[in-house]
Image (tube, grey):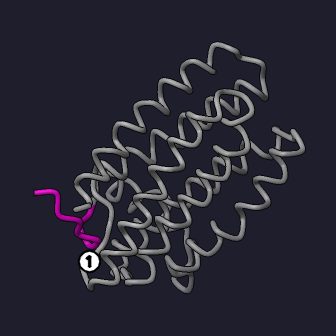
């Protein structure tokens, strides 16, 4: 029922087909985009750590958006690889988890941040176990929704810190709480 098919097109893939994917040269592979996200994560963290939000927040958004790019690129150009189906979610978890540990711990609550990162770690362990057993791994709609909500929740918190919109902090917490719900659903549909 919740099979993860890494070749299945998602609704956003159809939008990406006509917007961003044509702008990406054919020599750029999805795995290159995933590696770019991994390499850029410490740079995002550095700017956020320094409190340089005018660079850190747009950079976070851009690097987070590469998650949509590499997945759509892989599916639309039929370049899905076993490496990508494991390391793409790992790159997401590195980006989101590290920003959450940097920002949510300091400005919201350490236990809340550890809960988010803990569930992400369980998802990563589950993905690794499935890969070792030879099963196909890939995201499903619950995982994609979780990642989208995490990016929005973190982005709202970063905007609150950058622009002083304190109202965004409880909205961020609510969005991240909803992301936790989708993470738990994703965890249970992951076969753990």
Quadrant in which residue 130 is drawn: bottom left
Q: Position of residue 166 (x, y in %)?
A: 70, 15
Image position of 163 with respect to 64: above or below = above
Q: Which residue is mark 1?
A: 136
Identity of the residue drawn at 48% across and 24% down:
174
Quadrant in which residue 154 is drawn: top right
Q: Decide whether the magenta segment is chiefly helix, strand or loop.
A: loop
Q: Position of residue 152 (x, y in %)?
A: 53, 36
Image position of 59 with respect to 89: above or below = above
Of residues 62 and 148, the one nearer the viewer is 148
Q: Is residue 164 left or right of residue 171?
A: right
Which quadrant of the rendered structure holds the N terminus? bottom left
Image position of 109 with respect to 59: above or below = above
Of residues 172 and 105, the one nearer the viewer is 105
- Please tell me how crowded label 1 is: few (under 14), some (14-19), or many (20+) other residues with Cα within 10 Å: some
Please, what secondary structure does the residue beneath circle 1 have? Answer: loop
Q: Position of residue 32 (x, y in %)?
A: 58, 79
> Over which residues does the magenta segment extend?
1-9
Q: Position of residue 41 (x, y in %)?
A: 70, 61
* Farthest residue, direction left: 1
**What count of labels does the image hold?**
1
Identity of the residue drawn at 73% across and 44% down:
102
Of residues 32 and 190, the one nearer the viewer is 190
Which quadrant of the rendered structure holds the C terminus? bottom left
Q: Is residue 68 left or right of residue 33?
A: left
């Amino acid at each position: 029922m919740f099979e993860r098919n890494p070749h299945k097109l998602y609704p956003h893939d159809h939008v990406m087909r006509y917007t961003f994917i044509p702008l990406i040269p054919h020599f750029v592979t999805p795995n290159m985009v995933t590696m770019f996200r991994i390499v850029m994560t410490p740079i995002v963290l550095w700017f956020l750590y320094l409190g340089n939000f005018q660079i850190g927040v747009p950079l976070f958004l851009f690097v987070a958006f590469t998650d949509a790019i590499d997945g759509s690129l892989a599916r639309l150009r039929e370049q899905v690889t076993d490496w990508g189906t494991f390391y793409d979610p790992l790159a997401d978890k590195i980006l989101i988890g590290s920003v959450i540990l940097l920002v949510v711990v300091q400005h919201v609550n350490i236990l809340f941040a550890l809960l988010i990162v803990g569930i992400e770690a369980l998802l990563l362990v589950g993905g690794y176990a499935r890969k070792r057993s030879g099963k196909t791994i890939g995201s499903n709609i619950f995982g994609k929704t979780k990642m989208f909500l995490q990016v929005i929740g973190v982005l709202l918190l970063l905007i609150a810190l950058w622009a002083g919109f304190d109202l965004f902090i409880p909205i961020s917490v609510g969005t991240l709480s909803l992301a936790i719900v989708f993470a738990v659903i994703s965890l249970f549909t992951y076969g753990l």
